[in-house]
Image (cartoon, rainbow, N blue to C red):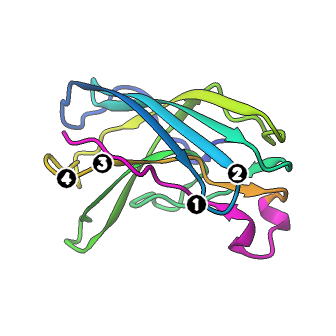
């Protein structure tokens, strides 16, 4: 399950950004042997997309870890997002998360040990707060629990949350 309270996946009324970035990012979690890659971040028709992989080298299954994106009005998501430093709609400085709303194919539940998930994720480009023009925009990969489900997790010690080391600039 990728999200609860899903919005429409039709083209957005957000800003028109028509850009493609052929990235070749290779990231890895610091505490767990989980590897991530990102390729082809694209902005088109009011939406963004990225080709990603997540490799589970932990020896245990990975389970989705829910989180609530900025301005989510309570919807819960476990998938990727674009991330940038900016001001929210109230003018407060913080990290802004622009959640993907689809993943094709969806992440297996659970992602078996040694398995790799490859997907194209995409989401709506927001009108407010706007994506920055000269500051980095990073990719937050899927948030997961190692070896336990969300219901079984006793703390965030089993949780892996990773943002790409590199970013793109619009």
Cα separation between marks 1 and 2: 22 Å
Q: Earlier in the sequence, mark 4 or mark 2?
A: 2
The percent coordinates of residue 78 (x first, y second) are: 61, 50
Residue drawn at x 19%, y 53% is 135
Q: Nearer the viewer, mark 1 or mark 4?
A: 4
Q: Earlier in the sequence, mark 2 or mark 3?
A: 2
The secondary element bearing badge 2 is classed as loop
Numbered circle sitting on residue 33: 2
Numbered circle sitting on residue 137: 3
Tell me whether the residue at label 4 lies in contact with that at label 3, contact meaning CB atoms closer than 8 angstroms. Answer: yes
Cα separation between marks 1 and 4: 25 Å
Cα separation between marks 4 and 3: 7 Å
Q: Which residue is mark 1?
A: 67
The percent coordinates of residue 156 (x first, y second) are: 69, 72
Numbered circle sitting on residue 135: 4
Q: Residues within 10 Å of mark 1 (few under 14, many from 20)?
A: some
Q: Residues within 10 Å of mark 2 (few under 14, many from 20)?
A: few
Q: Is residue 61 above or below residue 155?
A: above
The mark tally for this picture is 4
The secondary element bearing badge 3 is classed as loop
Residue drawn at x 44%, y 28% is 39
Asked if residue 68 lies left or right of residue 113, the reply is: left
Q: Which residues are magenta?
A: 150-170
Q: Is residue 156 magenta?
A: yes
Among the 4 quarters of the image, the one containing residue 22: top left
Cα separation between marks 2 and 3: 25 Å
Cα separation between marks 4 and 2: 30 Å
């Amino acid at each position: 399950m990728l999200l609860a309270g899903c919005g429409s996946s039709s083209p957005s009324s957000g800003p028109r950004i028509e850009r493609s970035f052929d990235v070749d990012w290779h990231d890895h979690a610091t505490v767990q042997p989980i590897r991530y890659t990102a390729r082809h971040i694209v902005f088109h028709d009011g939406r963004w997309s990225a080709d990603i992989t997540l490799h589970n080298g932990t020896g245990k299954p990975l389970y989705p870890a829910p989180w609530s994106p900025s301005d989510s009005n309570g919807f819960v998501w476990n998938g990727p997002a674009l991330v940038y430093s900016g001001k929210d709609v109230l003018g407060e400085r913080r990290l802004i998360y622009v959640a993907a709303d689809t993943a094709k194919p969806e992440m297996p539940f659970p992602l078996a040990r040694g398995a790799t998930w490859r997907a194209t994720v995409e989401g709506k480009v927001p009108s407010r707060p706007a994506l920055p023009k000269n500051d980095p925009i990073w990719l937050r990969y899927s948030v997961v629990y190692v070896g336990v489900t969300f219901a079984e997790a006793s703390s965030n010690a089993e949780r892996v949350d990773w943002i790409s080391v590199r970013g793109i600039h619009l």
